[in-house]
Amino acid sequence: MKPRALPDTNLPPYSGGRKEMIGAAVAGAAGLLLTLIGAAFSPQRALLAYLIAWVYWLGLAIGAITLVMGHHAAGARWNVSIRRFSETIGATIPLFAVLFIPLLLGARHVWFWVSPHEPVAKEMHELLQHKRPYLNLGFFTLRAVFYFALWTAFGWLLRAWSLRQDDTADPAFTVRARWWSPPGLLLFAITFTFGAFDWLMSLQPTWYSTIFGLYIYIGSFVSSVALLCLVITGVRSSGSPLGTVISVDQQHNAGKLLFAFTVFWAYMAFSQYMLIWAGNLPEELQWIVVRSRGVWRPVGILILVGHFVVPFFLLLSRDLKRSPPALGGIAAWMLVIHYIDLYWVVMPAVEGSSLGLHWTHLTAFVGVGGLAVAAALFLFRAARPVPVGDPFLQDSLRYVQP
């Protein structure tokens, strides 16, 4: 059997996407400005909308770096030709550190424990005092600085080593990335878990769950894989030279990753619910009870069906995972349902009896997302789209589904 001809990977830096980059930046700036205007009239609603959007887009970047480190740690080769997408998304982390400042400035409107503004019950007061050494704005800010310093270091180093390898073809950079990735995965799991505790779980400071951080982390990772699937299918359908570098087998593998971690997300969600139900402790039940009644019950059912049941059965199909339109459609839906999931996590903390819909949810999402997309396109245009110096690039191009 004659071996298939390998595509040309000696591609110049990506020159397209300039209009999209500028458009995303303009949309992002406009979205943030409108959100700021909304905050002037309704600070709590606008800042909660901003928090959801910020965590959503930050999670995509964290998940992208996690995916890069996971492949390095596993010694994977099939993904080399598509790795630059995830490296680029992960390198946008510093932007989110800057975008965290509005949340710090308006912290008293977001997190009740920052400045309790109404008489609280004696038990609540005692609990807040007990947690004061951890839940205070100074330590809260220092933890965030540490998280972002760590995430930025890993995101930028992994990308920098990969870019330098483009020029030198030195395999030592691959060795370095594979050596640092296993401890990096552990550090990311710990720090993002505590980030979820700080930014989301502390919205209800009397509630706690040890699984909650991993639930948020895995949800973000699933969405990052979905974003990668969406990018892959879009590039392959574009007919561009870069699209010829990505094979249907690599697309299939990305679809399998999406399937596997969708199941893992469901496992984490079930584990959290089951442990709270079995424990039957008042301080744990409050979180589940409010999200299982009234207007929030249908939202929870939608998340169960849309985040697990439907994707699970659809992604069982081999043909679907190898079809760009079909896989792209599923990936787009997963990105939508992840936002609904975060909305369901955040809003019942302050809106127990209503959905709390507000126009700033749209402006905040566009604002943070527009700047994130613009930053990713800017970085992608500044480098080769394929890691041409990686010693396993040829193996990636030859990859065939077993």
Image (cartoon, rainbow, N blue to C red):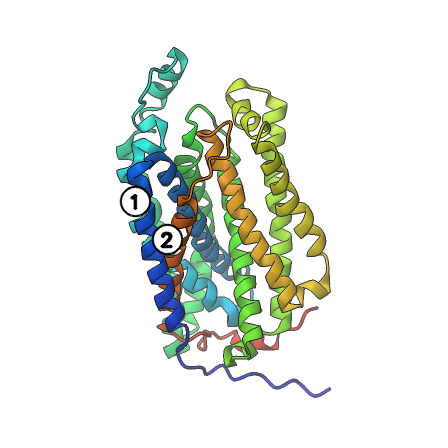
The vertical placement of 12 against 277, above or below, is below
The front one of 347 and 179 is 347
The front one of 221 and 177 is 221
Tell me: 207 left or right of 91. Answer: right
The front one of 1 and 246 is 246
- Secondary structure beneath dot 1 equals helix
Q: Position of residue 259 (x, y in %)?
A: 64, 54
Q: Earlier in the sequence, mark 2 or mark 1?
A: 1
Label 1 sits on residue = 37
User: Residue, x 39% and y 78% (percent of image)?
Assistant: 15
- Secondary structure beneath dot 2 equals helix
Q: Position of residue 347 (x, y in %)?
A: 47, 35
Amino acid type indicated by mark 1: Ile
Visible in this render: residue 160? no
The vertical placement of 26 against 271, above or below, is below
Label 2 sits on residue = 367
